[in-house]
Amino acid sequence: MEIHNTAAWYFAVINAVAIIAYGWDKLCAIRKWWRVPELTLLGIAAIGGSIGALVAMKLFHHKTLHLKFKYGVPLILALQVAGLVYLHMPR
């Protein structure tokens, strides 16, 4: 049961990090500051923050026109869901 708690905490934290990173990048874009690299934003989504990334994209109206984000983040989420389904299939 401890593994499930750890996983839940991990996903909560990484998705919060995704929302913060996308929000920070939006602020930096508006103020013409140094930006968060796109690879970093996509990497956060890839390591479990895809839901937070999608929420942030909608919330901040950020990266929604960039094809690698518009299609890449939902694809990452779909692959993550498929992986979880596969891991939980009876053997």
Image (cartoon, helix red, strand yellow):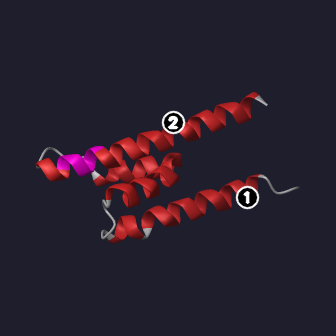
**1 or 2: tag closer to the N-terminus:** 2
For disc 1, the neighbor class at 10 Å (few under 14, some 14 to 19, many from 20) is few
Given residues 91 and 2, the one toward you in this image is: 2
Which image quadrant is residue 70 in? bottom left
Say which amino acid is labelled 1: Val
Identity of the residue drawn at 43% across and 70% down? 71
Q: CA distance from mark 1 to mark 2?
A: 22 Å
x and y, in percent, of residue 12 in the image: 55, 39
Label placed on residue 19: none
Main SS of residues in magenta: helix
Say which amino acid is labelled 2: Val
Name the side, left or right, on which 81 lies relative to 48: right
Give the residue pinned by disc 1. 85
Residue 67 among magenta residues:
no
For disc 2, the neighbor class at 10 Å (few under 14, some 14 to 19, many from 20) is some
Q: In this view, which residue lies farthest toward the left? A: 32
Identity of the residue drawn at 74% across and 28% down? 2
Q: Is residue 82 above or below residue 11?
A: below
Residue 25 among magenta residues:
yes
Given residues 43 and 58, the one toward you in this image is: 58
x and y, in percent, of residue 46 in the image: 48, 52
Name the side, left or right, on which 45 lies relative to 6: left
Give the residue pinned by disc 2. 13
Q: Element under label 2?
A: helix
Q: In this view, which residue lies farthest toward the right? A: 91
x and y, in percent, of residue 89 in the image: 82, 57
Name the side, left or right, on which 66 lies relative to 52: left
Identity of the residue drawn at 11% across and 49% down? 32
Identity of the residue drawn at 50% across and 65% down? 74
Which residues make up the magenta segment? Answer: 24-28
